[in-house]
Image: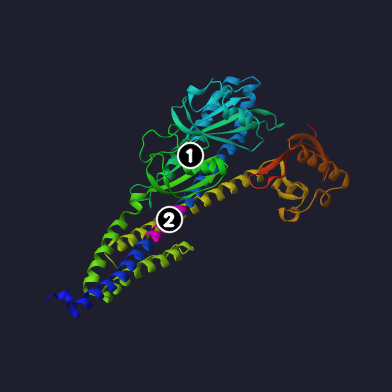
Amino acid sequence: MNPLASIRGKLLVLTLCISSLPIATISTIYYLTAKHTLRRQVLEQLKAVAASKRLHIQAFMEIKKMRTADFSSDGFIQNSLETIIRKNAGRGSRAGNLNRYLAKKKLPLDGHLIAIAIADRDGKVVASTNKTLIGRDMSAQEIFLQAKNLDYGQTYMKPRHASYLAANCILSSAPIRSQQNAEALGILINAYYFTGLNDITTNRVGLGETGEAYLVNRDKVILTESRFIGQAPFQLVVDTEPIRRILEKNQEMVGIYPDYRGVPVVGTSMDIPEYGWTLLTEIDEAEVFASLKTIGVIALIIGIAGAAVAAGVGIAFATSLSRPIKDFARKAETFGRGKLDYRIEVNRRDEIGDLASSFNAMADALSKEITEHKRFAEALRKSKEQSQAILDNTSAVIYLKDTSCRYLLINRQYEKLFHVTKEEVVGKTDYDLFPKENADAFRLNDQKVLETRRSMVVKELAPHDDGMHTYISLKFPMYDTVEGLYGVCGISTDITGK
């Protein structure tokens, strides 16, 4: 008798058929859930890494800008350049002294500095730590032309390949003004090695075997090193979907797309508008979903084996496999909500265990990256404190007011001369501090600067304990990248009796 013709055989066939459907369904749902969970986790990981690197890059660039502004306000540099351009006696020795000063006192302050150059008002380099630059005409260079239009304390930055330095570098420039009358004397140019940014983008911890992060400018040219193509910086054009979205729609992107090699990648883009850069963080799609191929094969085998023995065994086995995936997703979401010290317990030796181990490794790397960013933030804070110390130790009176002419900041010389403290002055106007005739004059000059949005040098009178003193005041508008014009800053020098 044919076994399949028996009731027992038919029941067995029926049982196998009935059990195969839920097992196949469960296996399919498990595979799709694992794929979706893995894709989401990788994208969240890439977003976190990209956000950390963007903060790191911004902190790095801010420090370089402040370094350039600090050099341009150095009294020795200002006085030396003024002597040189006015062709006073001792001009030659002053140029030599300035070269030595730059090489010994300024260049060692920043390990990323390649060279420092001082150009006069006509763009001719009169002093430099690089002797080959002395005498060079920089008048047609963008780094010189842009700085000529800047106010005191402002800087211009441009990454480029400088052939005269034979290096990819970040050029930063700031105007140099006379200490006596704020007259424009020339331009200070710092050239920084690009390795500082490369060190940030080529730190590929948490990016696997094919992941990379790199910067692209608005001309679609890659600025930092590529993991796959040598000599890419300033030569390789990156015309990919994330770049086009930034340029055409000003939209960042998270998803799957072909990279500059034509290889499908899982990636994110983040805009850094203040420098016109886009930060891309990507991993090859094949690497991201490699473990799913093995998981798919295992699911199929488990389905067949489960259908052969019993529906119950198949369902139980499928459930035992799906549970750790859901647990993994729940714990990953906990990590994503900010609990960076949260780790997944690794108690399996299969692909899921490998995925959990990779997640923990990524979490460790990300925590380290954030710690490094905090270190940079602390360095930025110290740099700001140093800038305040410079303001507090100058003999000039320095103050900052908002667009309503209310005080935001004063330096120590202001406190000393007018017998007030920062806390007493902030939020007040000149009418709260000075006689009306003096306050009227101050307010008129401040409003001219705010209305014209141009700097101006004026003569002003201020009451002292021994009577009225005459000041030469440089007043200029203040901007930021968020609110635009937000106030007016003044630097006033007492010329009474001079």
Kind of residue sitting beneath label 2: Gln
SS at mark 2 in the image: helix
Crowd around label 1: few <14 · some 14–19 · many ≥20 (10 Å): many
- Distance, label 1 to label 2, CA atoms, is 21 Å
Kind of residue sitting beneath label 1: Val
Q: Is residue 27 left or right of residue 125?
A: left
Residue 295, image x and y in percent?
A: 29, 60
SS at mark 1 in the image: strand
Q: Is residue 43 left or right of residue 355?
A: right
Residue 444, image x and y in percent?
A: 83, 41
Figure colour scheme: rainbow
The residue singled out by tag 1 in the image is 216
The reply to whether the magenta stretch includes residue 238 is: no
The outermost residue toward the bottom is: 7
Up-down: is 126 above or below 329? Answer: above
Question: Is the N terminus in the top left, top right, bottom left or bottom right quadrant?
Answer: bottom left
The outermost residue toward the left is: 1
Q: Is tag 1's residue or tag 2's residue first in the polypeptide sequence?
A: 2
Q: Which mark is residue 45?
A: 2
Q: Is residue 245 left or right of residue 412?
A: left
Q: Magenta part of the protein: which range?
A: 35-47
